[in-house]
Amino acid sequence: MKVVVHPSRLGGTLRVPASKSVMQRACAAALIRKGETILFHPGHSADDEAAISVIVALGATVQRQNDKLHIVSKGLVAERPLQIDCGESGLGIRMFTPIAACLSQPVTLTGRGSLQRRPMDFFNEVLPQLGVVVRTTNGRLPIDVEGPLVPASIEIDGTLSSQFLTGLLFAFAVSGAKNVSITVKGLVSKPYIDLTLAVLRSFGLPCPENRGYEVFHFSTMDPMSGNNNGTGEDGADAPVRSAIHRPALGSPLLYTVESDWSSASFLLVAGALAGPIHVQGLDLQSYQSDRALLQVLDEAGVSYAVDAKGIVVHPSEIKPFVFDATDCPDLFPPLVALAAYAQGTSIIKGAHRLQHKESNRAQTLQQEFAKMGVGIQSIDDSLVIEGGGVVQGANVSSCDDHRIAMALAVAALRANGSTTISGAEAISKSYPSFFADLSLLGASVSLPDLN
């Protein structure tokens, strides 16, 4: 699908869709918890739908009721060998593989698109230490696992992605881990582990003590008491967030999926380039790492104001900035769009985190933004973006990467001439209504599939 974005001025108010990072974790927690769960403000992205299909395959029943999901689970259930499709979700395959390994029946996990190219050697190295038989295809999908997984004290590499640790934390919670620890070397994206721990606590599941993001220790304390959470840097000693409502015995657990800072980052940058717009629904105290975008907006001199309902962003003269995105690599695409309009050279550090995404994002950002006249160099572990020039409308491609498609669209809002984005349907992975929402804010967008 090709979408044409014309130079535009934006205005209006928009509520940010649900976070797929939170939504997928909440689906996993609802499956593991047993009983009834009602998820309010659920996500509708392709990754969210994949997570729903996985928990149904693993024994849950799910019903959509307006803007909520009703989930009933008896725990992990599989009466025969299963084949599970995680779609194109990196979090999905990394989280649900250890969970599925808690079953004694064989489970095959598959995926589509770029997920088939992502390395899965982690499971070959770690799961056998926990009693799981694992087979991959030269370190790629599909993955065959046969458990049951038996929790034990292990050491893992955390430098590729924190999502592998998230999967193990859920699996240990399923398996009733006691007096065992997961030691992690070089953990990246620590805020996403904070998010995982917060979801475990919210659903009353066994939650480890976070010892400085290096050791996660499961004790024998009652998970509902909160006494096993420790007082580490994850904020585990903070009160339970308002999104969770503790149920009475036999009542459903009510959980509201918070809005997505990753999706909001594109809207906030769009507001800085072509606003003003009012972005609503964001939790300013969220564990989502992409909340760090506000730090960049401050450094870049973007004018914005926080009110009771959200964030109002005004068009601004963009200053060059330096930012380390190691723990929030999904910010690279919107920040490149922002840096393209800065009056000078901006530097975004942590580019090694971009290799195993839907595309090799460092290369893709360089390639596609070059078509718009934006010079980007890859130096050491950073992208160096030369701002201050004229950003030209051009024929560009998403390269089947949802965040590339959205970054190009945002940059196009203030470009000299129209921009045609091929492969724009990639947005369905995380933000299916992105182009429609831009239109609601006043952007001139040609949507061939809606004509």
Image: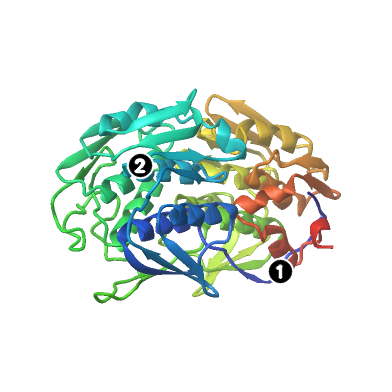
Task: Return the residue nearer the eye: 103 or 211.
Answer: 103
Residue 64 showing in the rendered view: yes
User: Is residue 408 shown left or right of residue 357?
Assistant: right
Indicate which disc residue 105 carries. 2
Kindly state the secondary structure of the residue where label 1 is placed: loop
Splitting the image into 4 quarters, where does residue 368 fall?
A: top right
**Nearest the camera: 257 or 10?**
257
Image position of 272 with respect to 393: above or below: below
Side of 406 where 298 appears, left or right: left
Q: CA distance from mark 1 to mark 2?
A: 54 Å
Answer whether labels 1 and 2 touch (C-beta < 8 Å). Answer: no
Residue 270 horizontal side relative to residue 147, left or right: right
- Return the residue nearer the eye: 118 or 265: 118
Q: Residue at left 65%, top 53%?
A: 428
Question: Does residue 301 appear to the left or right of 317 in the view shown?
Answer: left
Q: Residue at x 52, y 28 (%)?
A: 381
The residue located at (40%, 56%) in the rendering is 59
Q: Amino acid at mark 1?
A: Gly
Q: Amino acid at mark 2?
A: Gln
Q: Which mark is residue 11?
A: 1
